[in-house]
Image: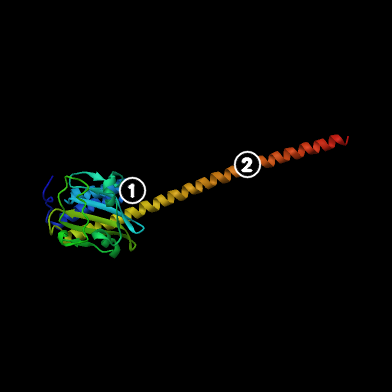
Amino acid sequence: VPDRPPTRPDDLVSRLQQAYEIGTAITSIHDLDTLVQLSVTRIRKDLKYQNVTLFSLIGDELVVMGMSLETGRFMNLSDLTETQNHLRSIKIGQHIIGHAALTGEPVLVSDISNDPRYKGWNQLDPLLQPMQSELAIPLKADGRVLGVLNIESTMVHDFTEDDQRILGLLTGQIAVALENIRLHQKSQEHIQSLDALNKKMASEITDRKYAEEALRNSENRLRLALEASQM
């Protein structure tokens, strides 16, 4: 396990190219689980970060969607144990991550030991090094906050405005991808509802036809019986 973060290239152009490639991959995904795992894993590996976590804003809480840790381990909400329940979600406005969601603006903390808002994720894996700096960037679509992307490092002053700028571009693409998946799921649910309604209507029409045919048969038998009784 590294005791310091991987070295990131100083060349902003090459880092932007890497971010572009990640963004292209993100926008081609239509499955939520795949989107989350690819996003946090490639951001960590390709852009040389240590701990990368993606949160979704549900009501007034930020819920863990997935995280890629410096040990190479990927975790989602279902991987957290009962002793880690307190790490499953963060109230909006609380801690560094919740503050980013509340304000809708990135929060860069160069030394988390001096910030009382910090909530440590090194409790997730005993092999993780203590974190020293953090960068939390909200996921926004049409002005709405959908979640937060959180990056951590074992070094103080490890993040710069370039990191914030690059990750800001990616969070925009992740937010759009999340919204597209949500709309697709909603569309599919609507289609399924219409299909169920059509089947129900078809069944009712069939039942009505059988009932009408049975009524006509009954009327015919009654008419024949009346005619026979009058002869």
Q: Quadrant of the C terminus?
A: top right
Determine whether the residue tagged by mark 2 lies in a helix, strand or loop. Answer: helix
Instruction: Tell me the SS state at disc 1.
Output: helix
What type is the residue that disc 2 sits on? Asp
Count neighbours of disc 2 (C-alpha within 10 A) and say few if under 14, some if 14 to 19, many if 20 or more.
few
41 or 90, nearer to the observer: 90
Q: Is residue 89 left or right of residue 188?
A: left
Q: Nearer the viewer, residue 156 or 39?
A: 156
Count of labels in the image: 2
Q: Position of residue 138 (x, y in %)?
A: 27, 59
Left or right for 20, reference 228: left
| C-alpha distance separating marks 1 and 2 | 41 Å
Q: Residue furthest bottom?
A: 103
Name the residue that disc number 2 marks.
Answer: 207
Report x, y in % for residue 13.
16, 57
Q: Which mark is residue 32?
A: 1
